Amino acid sequence: MSDFLIRHSLIASSVVKIAVLLFMVLTALAYLTWFERKVVAHIQSRWGPYRVGPHGLLQPLADGLKFIMKEDPMPAGVDKFVFVLAPLLAMTVALTALGIIPFGPQEIELFGRKTSLAIVDLNLGLLFLFAISSLGVYGVALAGWASNSKYPLLGGLRSSAQMVSYELALTLSVVGVVLMAGSLSLRDIIQSQSGWSWHFLPRWNLFAGPLPQVLGFFCYFTAAIAETNRAPFDLAEAEQELVGGFHTEYSSMKFAMFFMAEYANMVTVSCLATILFFGGWLSPCPVTGHWIWTLYLPAAVFVLGGLGLIWDGLHYTTPIGKFELTVLGAVLVGVGGLTAAPFAIHFAQGPFWFLTKVLAFLFVYVWVRGTLPRFRYDQLMAIGWKLLLPVSLANVVFTSLALVVKNK
Amino acid sequence: MVPVSYYVVLSAVLFGLGIIGFLFKRNIITMFMSIELMLNAVNLAFIAFSSVLGNLAGQVYVFFVIVVAAAEAAVGLAIVILIARNRKTLNVERVNLLKL
Amino acid sequence: MTAVLFFLLAAVAVAAAVSLILQREPIHSALSLIVVMAALAGLYLLLGAEFISAVQIIVYAGAIMVLFIFVIMLLNAGVEERTQFSRMARYIGLPLAFVLGAGLVYWITRWTMGTASAASMGSVTRPLAMMLFQDYVFPFELTSILILIAIVGAVVLARREDERQ
């Protein structure tokens, strides 16, 4: 058996990596919904889910059960094949884009084969990501068409027109980064951001290089929020405007797939933002000399978080909540201890910093949703074509000029 | 290892299917899509030859073919919208009067 | 391994192309064409043209076909009527088409030029970019003007009548 696995090690290692990534991503998507509801609720001075499990932590489980057991009607007159295809397409495209994101610099060994911490490491990684995300328009457009009803059709057309318009600004705002790194491979882009200028400022694409890519970053993030149909650009699916937009006629598992696809797109975009502009898995503190204690930061974060959870669990109201929170806190302390152990400390650095930065971006996404009012559709399209596209073009021109001046 | 003639045969088959689609369909949008299929078949032949000869000019030509196909699709579909608005039909056999 | 992938992708492409012709709804034909383009992108990867494969998906499958789908949705293109397949076409045309096809396949496969593989190309993006911006820079700039003309033409043609004042 193991001989068979070693002979077909490419397929076997890929299957293992895909299984691990899929499990992590689906759990993260479920808890992202909890995170969003809690944060938006606290912004709006209310509590959010707090009944189902301690602090509402079992709410995603309840939602999942609801989605599985709900009735799944197919409205009359819909195009059955396209109706079922649209959410599948949206979900597949959203999850495929997560395949090339590198979570850390190391190479692990699976079944006798050295592989990187991404499912596949392409040297045209960025272009592949844009290709996959441009296929995401079909899920929305076909859902609107297949629903045989006027609100979904309008919502679907508006959503897909918005996504296509902001794709241009998204792709152009990244060209500056590619020019500075000299490669389209995500791993090379992160490697080109290593090192610290003046011994303390990390050489991330946001601060350093011939031209700090601040303009590119703001264009990218704004275009990404519009591309993933999130507030304040979510006119096409808002309840007050178009009932539900393109997913009005969908319920239960198919709606859950659209929902998951939207959050998966958010995660992909956040991962890409950290890789391109914030140094990916690189730590912001130099880990040599007398800064070596920063190697223990992941462990410190986990241990402190675990202890805080244990304290909170001991003072919680319901007995079962006490038990669950204390166990969770103990698990976190255990993970913290594991990351401080000498055999795992260098392995844990890359993924820890990467996931921290991605979590920060997801928080900004939810923060923006809770704070800003929605744009009207014509304002939305005007921003995409008349503001973001010229600004990202200007960014490309300035970056090229800076590179030419530097190479003189 | 796949000989290049297999790719050329595939390109010919797709091109032939595109011609069949163009001749036998009556909906103008479907005829347009058959034209796009023919262009794709030609792109495949270009890239196959570029790969076997080691010359990158084939890929440059494919780049230009894709760009020209995009421009043609945009203007062609605008004309299709105009026809549909004026004649209220998408059937090419009904668009047979020179005068409106 | 390459041969398996080639035959798989080729079968998918031909099946989708046949589906394009045989479907009655234009939306299903458009979806079949998207499948053909995706299969062709896979074939380009097998041939070592990785950049063109990505460009095919971004531009052709991701933008041009979206345009087609928009137009089909806006015009509400309905089911196509059944054509009566003329007897000449059915009894003389189809067999002759098969004979022509078989002859083409025979004569093409008899002439061997070599094997086409991805390994022969190496990294393609930088040399391609050099060629595009040095040898072929004039057609490149011309295509940008062409796209500008296409944009202006499409906007002017598809505008509504009452907006002309």
Image (cartoon, coloured by chain):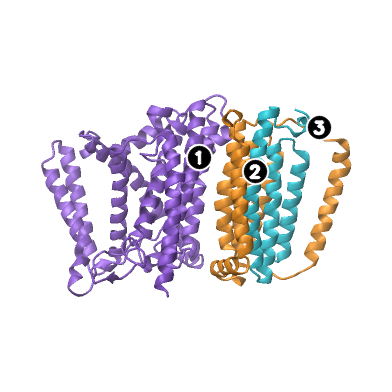
The local crowd at label 2, few if under 14, some if 14 to 19, many if 20 or more residues have their Cα within 10 Å, is many
Residue at horizontal 60 percent and vertical 54 percent from the top: C145
Amino acid marked by disc 3: Gln
Cα separation between marks 1 and 2: 18 Å
Q: Nearer the viewer, residue C2 or B23?
A: B23
Q: How many marks?
A: 3
Q: Which residue is mark 2?
A: B75
| Labelled disc at residue A161 | 1
Image spot of residue A67 (x, y percent): 39, 34
| Labelled disc at residue C84 | 3
Q: What shade does chain C have?
A: orange
Amino acid marked by disc 2: Val
The local crowd at label 1, few if under 14, some if 14 to 19, many if 20 or more residues have their Cα within 10 Å, is some
Q: Secondary structure at mark 2?
A: helix
Q: Is residue A61 above or below residue B18?
A: above
Chain of the residue that carries numbered disc 2 in the rendered image? B
Q: Is residue A305 visible?
A: yes
Among the chains, which one is cyan?
B
Residue A217 sits in which quadrant? bottom left
Residue at horizontal 42 percent and vertical 48 percent from the top: A388
The local crowd at label 3, few if under 14, some if 14 to 19, many if 20 or more residues have their Cα within 10 Å, is few
Of all residues shown, which one is farthest toward the front?
Answer: C165
Judge depth for marks 3 and 2 and give the one in front.
2
Q: What shade does chain A have?
A: purple
Give yes or no for contact between labels 3 and 1 (Cβ–Cβ under 8 Å): no
Q: Is residue A344 visible?
A: no
Cα separation between marks 3 and 2: 31 Å
